[in-house]
Amino acid sequence: MYAPPEHRPAPVLLQPLTPPALPPGNPAGMRWLAELHADPQSCLDAWTAGRLAGIPLGRFEVLRVSASIGYAILQNGPRTAPVLHTVALGTTDFFLIPGSMPAHNSVGMLQQTGVLPCPAPGRALPRRRTLPLPGEHVSPEDLAPTWLVKPDGSGDLWHGEQVLAATHSAYAYFDSLSHHESTPAPAQPGAPRPEAAAQFIAASRRAS
């Protein structure tokens, strides 16, 4: 039946579907990290709620080293692959290409299985900025890690040989400082600061 224009129902405008909003931070890095989980949405939900998301190892491995060694590695190598830091534990976690690092090495502890708790890339901040004193109570919130190098969505991972080379380069530099009574010449750009030498050498020898 014909209806005059003034009596015709107004057309219904369909709103385009939009994907669920990601929490503030680094969207590309979040999507890449979440896709490493069997249920990516559960990771995004955890990050939106301000919680850690457990990312299973397998498509990447983790090399856990002391904070001083981790600092030296970052000073002597590129900063393109993810690195986590837990202030309360004094540890640094490097995301590695699977199979690229020997299980028995002089740098740190290699983790090939299990789950790694991760904050939202580009969002979380360290819960504390100092190491706990002996006997001091450490809460679960204190143990939450933060990103030194957050995932950028490219999928880049550290190669084990790259980490070893950066560590050996830093150790050689630090060791040269410990054998000179006078102030050494300024290091090349990107070299570790001299004041980190004592910490690095002590940590390296404990790890070896």
Image: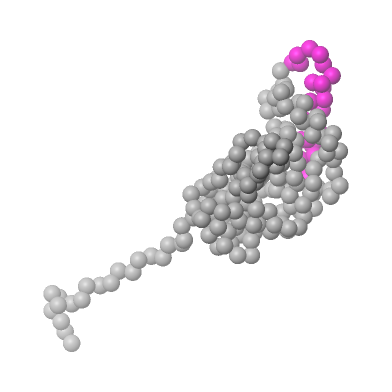
In magenta, the rendered stretch is 159-185
Q: Nearer the viewer, residue 56 or 190?
A: 56
Res 74 visible: no
Q: Tell whether 166 sits left or right of 104.
A: left
* Residue 80 image offset from top left, x and y in percent: 65, 42
- Where 181 sits versus 108, above or below? above
Which residue occupies 75% across, 46% down? 63
* Residue 39 image offset from top left, x and y in percent: 60, 65
- Work out which quarter of the rendered image holds the C terminus and state it: top right
Is residue 124 within the magenta segment? no
Which residue occupies 75% across, 14% down? 183
Q: Determine which quarter of the picture holds residue 185.
A: top right
* Main SS, magenta residues: helix
* Residue 84 image offset from top left, x and y in percent: 66, 44
- Where 113 sits versus 77, above or below? below
Q: Nearer the viewer, residue 137 or 188?
A: 137
* Residue 45 image offset from top left, x and y in percent: 53, 59
Q: Determine which quarter of the picture holds residue 87.
A: top right
Q: How many marks?
A: 0
Q: Tell whether 135 sits left or right of 12.
A: right
Res 157 visible: yes
